[in-house]
Amino acid sequence: MALTSKIAKDTTILKVPKRMSSIMEMKEIFLNADAVCFDVDSTVIREEGIDELAKFCGVGDAVAEMTRRAMGGSVTFKAALTARLGLIRPSYEQVQKLISEHPPQLTPGIRDLVNLLHQRGVQVFLISGGFQSIVDHVASQLNIPTANIFANRLKFYFNGEYAGFDETQPTAESGGKGQVISYLKKQFQFKKVVMIGDGATDMEACPPADCFIGFGGNVVRKQVKEKAKWYITHFDELLKELEER
C-alpha cells in the first residue's frame, strides 16, 4: 500500500450524442466493474465524521468551515486534516463514546446497493479521508471486510490523549484515493474500477479509476456537480441500472 470528428452542419445534433455516448460508456463500466470504491463521509453515511467528532468535542462550527473548504478543493486535504484535528484533539475515549452514542447513519439505499454488488461478485471498498475506527463500524453494517477499508488512523498516547494521525496513510494526502485505486488495480488485476463520492478528493481519483460517479444525496459540492459527467442524488439510480441488466 506504500501503494479521450466529424464536422456536422447541425451542431446541436452533434453535441447531444457526444454527451449521451459518454454517459452510456460510463454506465457500461459500472455494469461491468470488477470493483466499486465508495467514499464514506456524506456518501455511504449521511454525515461528515470529522464534523460530528468536532461537535462532540465542542469545536463544531470552526471545523465544519474547514471541512467545507477542504471538500471544495481550495486547500490540500492533508493541511485541512492537520488543522482540523489540531482544533479537535480528540481523545480515544471521546472517539469511542461518539461511535456508541451517535453512530453514523447509513445513507438510504446504500445497504441494498452494496448487497447487490456483492451478489454480482463485485468487490466493494471503502476509501475514506475519515477515521478507521468510524469506518470500521460502517463497514461492519455493510458486510465489507476490514481488508477492504482504506482510511486515516488516529494516534493516541498511552493515557488515551490525542497524539496525531498516521501521516503515512495515502488517504491523508490529496490524491491519496487515486493511489489506493492504483494499488488495488495492481494488486488484484482489476480491469474496471468505479469511484463514487461527493467530494473533490473522490473526483480526482479518476483516473486511475475508470469511472467517477458524483453523489449529491447528502450534500452538494458545487465543483463536483458541475464537473462530474455522471451525477446522482440517490443510490436507487444505481440500483436501477444494475437491476435492469
Image (cartoon, rainbow, N blue to C red):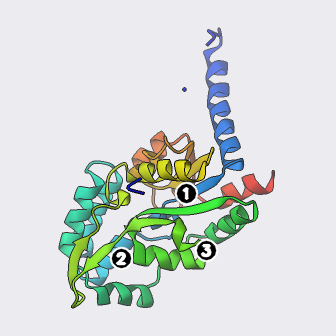
What's the distance in space between the residues labelled 2 and 1, CA to CA? 23 Å
The mark nearer the N terminus, 2 or 3, is: 2
> Would residue 41 be found to the left or right of residue 163 on screen?
right
Placement of 5 over or under 131, stated as above or below: above
| Horizontal and vertical percent position of residue 217 | 53, 61
Task: State the residue at coordinates (30%, 74%).
Answer: 154
Q: Are marks 2 and 1 in contact (CB under 8 Å)?
A: no
Residue 236 figure quarter: bottom right
Residue 97 figure quarter: bottom left
Three-letter code, disc 1:
Cys
| Residue 105 visible in the shown view | no
| Horizontal and vertical percent position of residue 208 | 49, 42
> Would residue 115 be found to the left or right of residue 172 on screen?
right
Residue linked to disc 3: 142
Residue linked to disc 2: 52
Task: State the residue at coordinates (61%, 13%).
Answer: 5
Three-letter code, disc 3:
Leu
